[in-house]
Amino acid sequence: MHIPWRSSQFAEFAHNLDIATVERLRKQKGARYIKANKLLELRRKPAVNTSLDPFVPGGLPRNCYDPTFLQSKSPVALELLNVQEELIEFPIV
């Protein structure tokens, strides 16, 4: 799912978490359970474009946000977003 404010690193990390969750559930519950209930990716629907601005969580490290998104914001909006300068190292899942 494309989220405009999210950096590619953060998006890849979230995708890897989704995959790891499906694998964990497949091991715990069995492959038949995963197929029968259509978890996570199987239940996703195409994104719906709306005229509303998406919610953007504040206080995340700078490398969680897309650089183009940050550049498009005014100084006041950036101050309200409270971007943390300390970067996070995304673990490999």
Image (cartoon, rainbow, N blue to C red):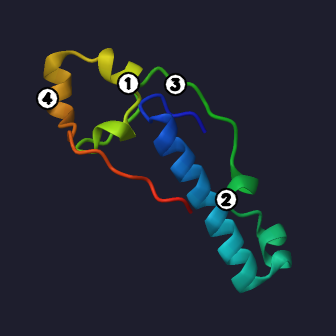
Q: Quadrant of residue 17?
A: bottom right
Q: Quadrant of residue 60?
A: top left
- The residue mark sitting in front, 4 or 3, is 4
Q: Which residue is mark 4?
A: 79
Look at label 1 and name its amino acid: Pro
Q: Name the one closer to the observer, 51 or 79.
A: 79
Q: Which residue is mark 2?
A: 40
Q: Which residue is mark 3?
A: 50
Q: Earlier in the sequence, mark 2 or mark 4?
A: 2
Q: Residues within 10 Å of mark 4 (few under 14, many from 20)?
A: few
Q: Write the residue at 52% across / 51% down.
A: 13
Residue 40 pos. (x, y %): 67, 59
* Residue 56 shows in this picture: no
Q: Is 92 rendered above or below residue 5?
A: below
Q: Quadrant of residue 33?
A: bottom right
Look at label 2 and name its amino acid: Leu
Q: Write the residue at 31% across / 42% down.
A: 57
Q: Which residue is mark 1?
A: 67
Q: Earlier in the sequence, mark 3 or mark 2?
A: 2
Position of the N terminus by quadrant: top right
- The residue mark sitting in front, 2 or 4, is 4
Residue 76 pos. (x, y %): 13, 21
Q: Are marks 3 and 1 in contact (CB under 8 Å)?
A: no
Look at label 3 and name its amino acid: Thr
